[in-house]
Image (cartoon, rainbow, N blue to C red):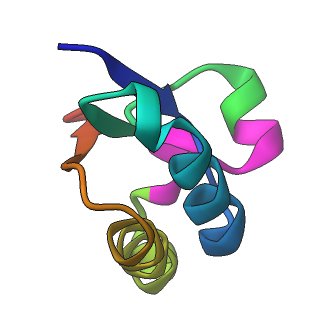
Amino acid sequence: PLVAHFSANNPQHFAQAAKLVEPVCDAIDLNLGCPQRTAYLGHFGSYLLGDEDRQLVLDIVKAGSQSVTIPIFVKIRLL
């Protein structure tokens, strides 16, 4: 299987990106596990796992799942 791997912090951008790759992928992975400094600076990856971003993560997943028919996975890192 071919899985497209994205980081995101904007529901609409994630949905648009998911739609672009849907025809050529079997699934989409939202990366909530990246602990790198660039993820901190860009506010994505594991830096969305705090309670204050819970609704944002839900909105990202919801927007993506409503825009495509292929599965969406969410990768997290237990810190």
Write the residue at 52% across / 40% down: 45
Which residue is drawn at the image coordinates 32% and 69% (left, top)? 65
Magenta run includes residue 43: yes
Is residue 29 depicted above or below 54 in this figure? above
Q: Is residue 33 above or below residue 50?
A: above
Main secondary structure along the magenta-highlighted residues: helix
Magenta span of residues: 40-48
Answer whether residue 66 is visible to the viewer in this image.
yes
Q: Position of residue 52 (x, y in %)?
A: 50, 80
Q: Is residue 64 above or below residue 56?
A: above
In the rendered image, residue 41, in percent from the top left (x then y), is placed at 82, 39
Quadrant containing the C terminus in the rendered view: top left
Report the residue at 43% width, 26% height from top: 24
Outermost top residue: 1
- State how many labels appear: 0
Residue beneath the point at 23% across and 50% down: 70
Q: In this view, does 63 lie to the left or right of 70?
A: right
Which quarter of the picture shows residue 75? top left
- In the drawing, does residue 19 fall left or right of residue 2? right
